[in-house]
Amino acid sequence: VRPNNYSTFYDDHRQNWSIMFESEKAAVDFSKQVCIAKCNSSPALDSVLCQDLLLGEGQGVEGGDSLEVAYTGWLFQNNGLGQVFDSNVNKDKLLRLKLGSGKVIKGWEEGMLGMKKGGRRLLIIPPAWAYGAQGVAGRVPPDSTLVFEVEVRRVKLAKECSGSDGLSVSSRDSPAPSPVPSSDGFSSD
């Protein structure tokens, strides 16, 4: 995925190709289908499959960084997107999480590394990296492969360095408007 609705890829002969799409939606939809095709052509999905849909800006997030995320989760059914089992896209609150804290499924911890503020990514997560054999009663059947579209809306970086004037300056910060008022240290400018 590249800026301005471009995608590039290599074929089996290492020939480089670029495709320009008419709209961001067309580029995103194509990238989703590529990820689903990768999953369907894999003999056994044993790790998280990630596909960037939009790149975002700034430095990629690392363990210890705090994020606010909009997401939608589907069950992977019939070789594609099945039933939506969870989403916060049309809700007032974003999901707050700290990467590496173990508060979300392992597939999210892995799949979100390197994402940038404003970035969107499709994650296809095998059962062992999600809810496993127990599932989630009434929502996720046991041994379900899950698909999430995640968008990083805000980032609070864990690593900060001290500037020469003694003020604390983040080396990877990118301020953004706050979607909701907060008092937990997220930038609201």
Image (spheres, rainbow, N blue to C red):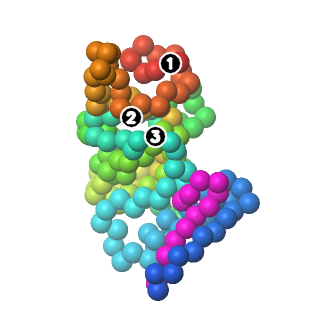
Measure the C-alpha gap from mark 3 to mark 2.
Answer: 7 Å
Dot 2: what SS? Answer: loop
Q: Write the start and end of the magenta stretch as one range.
A: 1-12
Q: Nearer the viewer, residue 113 or 90?
A: 113
Instruction: Name which of mark 2 and mark 1 comes first in the sequence.
Output: 2
Q: Which of 126 and 188 is in front in this view?
A: 188
- Residue 138 image position (x, y, % from top left): 43, 45
- Residue 50 image position (x, y, % from top left): 42, 58
Q: Is the C-beta separation of discs 3 and 2 under 8 Å?
A: yes
Query: In the image as oriented, which residue stretches furthest toward the right?
Result: 22
Quarter in which the N terminus is drawn: bottom right
Question: Which residue is the site of mark 2?
Answer: 172
Dot 1: what SS? Answer: loop
Answer left or right for 120 relative to 128: right
Question: Which residue is the site of mark 3?
Answer: 58
Look at the image and say whether residue 151 sits in the magenta stretch: no
- Residue 55 image position (x, y, % from top left): 51, 50
- Residue 25 image position (x, y, % from top left): 67, 54
**Which quadrant of the structure image shows residue 67?**
top left
Instruction: Name which of mark 3 and mark 2 comes first in the sequence.
Output: 3
Question: Badge 1: how crowded within 10 Å, few (<14), some, or many (20+)?
Answer: few
The residue that appears at 57% across and 30% down in the rendered structure is 91
Question: Badge 3: how crowded within 10 Å, few (<14), some, or many (20+)?
Answer: some
Q: Could you tell me the amino acid type at mark 2?
A: Arg
Dot 3: what SS? Answer: loop
Query: In the image as oriented, which residue stretches furthest toward the bottom?
Result: 13
**Residue 74 is at least partly visible in this image:** no
Number of the label disc, if any, that sits on residue 188: 1
The residue that appears at 67% across and 65% down in the rendered structure is 20
Measure the C-alpha gap from mark 2 to mark 1.
Answer: 17 Å
Q: Is residue 186 above or below residue 61?
A: above
Q: Is the C-beta separation of discs 2 and 1 under 8 Å?
A: no
